[in-house]
Amino acid sequence: MLRGTIQVPGDKSITHRAIIFASLAAKRSKITDALLGQDCLATIDCFRSLGVTIFIENDTTVVIDSPGVEQFQQPNKPLDCQNSGTTARLLMGILSALPFETTLIGDASLSKRPMQRVVTPLTQMGARITLSEQGTLPAVIVGNQQLKSITYHSPIASAQVKSAVLLAGLFAQGTTTVVEPEQSRDHTERFFELLAYPFAQISPYITTITRCSMFTFPDIYSVPGDISSAAFWLVGATVIPGSDVTLTHVGLNKTRMGIVEALQKMNAHVSVQVTNTDGEQTGIIRVQSHQLCGAIFSGAQIPKMIDELPILAFAATQAKGQTIIRDAKELRVKESDRITQTAKVLNQLGANVSTYEDGFMIEGPTHLTQSGYFNSFGDHRLAMLLVIAQTCIGEALQIENLSAYKVSYPTFLEDLESIQINEGENE
Ligand code: S3P
């Protein structure tokens, strides 16, 4: 069983954005409680190549000493975004406005992911961007200091697309508007608010930004814990009998709360206590094991838990009845094809999962067993799902590419060890 308290690492999306906004401002800023996993380190390295001095003080603190975006230098080598879609897509928004050419590259997984979705609006704004024939990285970006503002109706609810356009909008003449089909996470907008940049939230789906004349950042900024990392404990503690886990200083942003709402709909015992409402809301989540029941998820619920759908599908294998997840086609273009690979892994564990083009149908509950070699396919969220499965089964699985978890949760295994109580052990 799992019992105890965990401070989950800093939010990945917010850490990326804190590094980006701090780097744009001509000053020294400190980011505390940051996630310094591989993805965010990739963002740090990209800004170093642009001329920003970044010092990693300890595992969760980074000091950014920037000359300001006006002084950014053309990098003398391609910027390597590694596994990180957020790095590639958000940086493209900024690089579109700079007076030089840059090239973005990534690892094998990122080099398969679609980039045309950001190139289309950024090209409309006046940047010149060339992708591979497949619409993927490498991207060569020729920036334009005279970007035009646009109104962009995004065909997908994607915070990365929205943020790329809004970041470019900080440098464009006039007011740039992004309209989304459903609301995606709003961390970029919350930074605009914190920094008093000229933006307006017309509705949850419509955001505007007007050219910014002066970039700024607080001297110290603390990153809330990542609800996407917390999700593994929310599900693990729900399905492993006798568990009782408390998660502290977790980000409770409304656009990210889908996993909590979904588990509550499935009858989980999850309670939330808000402790801070200033800026990004944070608080404490307590979860105690409880029998789940199946449920149906679609539409606006999906972007609010897009990264948690693999572990939610795992939870559904332990729920009584049928769970259906639809409108989640975006999962096919994440760090892996998360519809195919999640179903593959869960069925290998003995679950009963079938797929749609845009989701899953899961019949539960099933008794899970270990069998042969499992593979995370280099996807951090699948690696952690497999570790939760192993904890639930109570026997070690042979997991290939397990270390992928370090992309978003470098202390995942230590945290597990700190709350795992094996049968017969005293509490
Ligand atoms: C992210 C947005 C999400 C999410 C990703 C991080 C972000 O992607 O899957 O892990 O930081 O903006 P989309 O909203 O683009 O689908």
Image: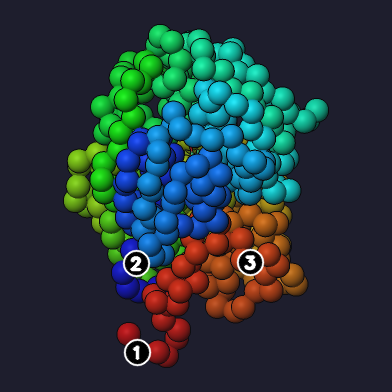
Rendered view: 189 above or below 422: above
Front disc: 1 or 3:
3
Report the amino acid beneath label 2.
Ile
* Alpha carbons under labels 2 and 3: distance apart: 21 Å
In the picture, measured across the screen, residue 271 lies left or right of residue 49, that is left
Report the amino acid beneath label 1.
Asn
Q: Which residue is mark 3?
A: 402
Report the amino acid beneath label 3.
Leu
Q: Is label 3's Cβ within 8 Å of ligand 1?
A: no
Rendered view: 301 above or below 146: below
Cβ–Cβ under 8 Å for marks 1 and 3: no
Q: Position of residue 40 (x, y in %)?
A: 50, 50
In the picture, measured across the screen, residue 170 lies left or right of residue 217, that is right
Q: Position of residue 170 (x, y in %)?
A: 41, 22
Quadrant location, the N terminus:
bottom left
Residue that protrudes farthest toward the right in the picture? 133
Cβ–Cβ under 8 Å for marks 1 and 2: no
For marks 2 and 3, the one nearer the N-term is 2
* Alpha carbons under labels 1 and 2: distance apart: 19 Å
Q: Position of residue 54 (x, y in %)?
A: 44, 51
Q: Which residue is mark 2?
A: 6
Residue in the picture at 56% in, 18% down: 144
Quadrant housing residue 326: top right
Rendered view: 28 above or below 73: below
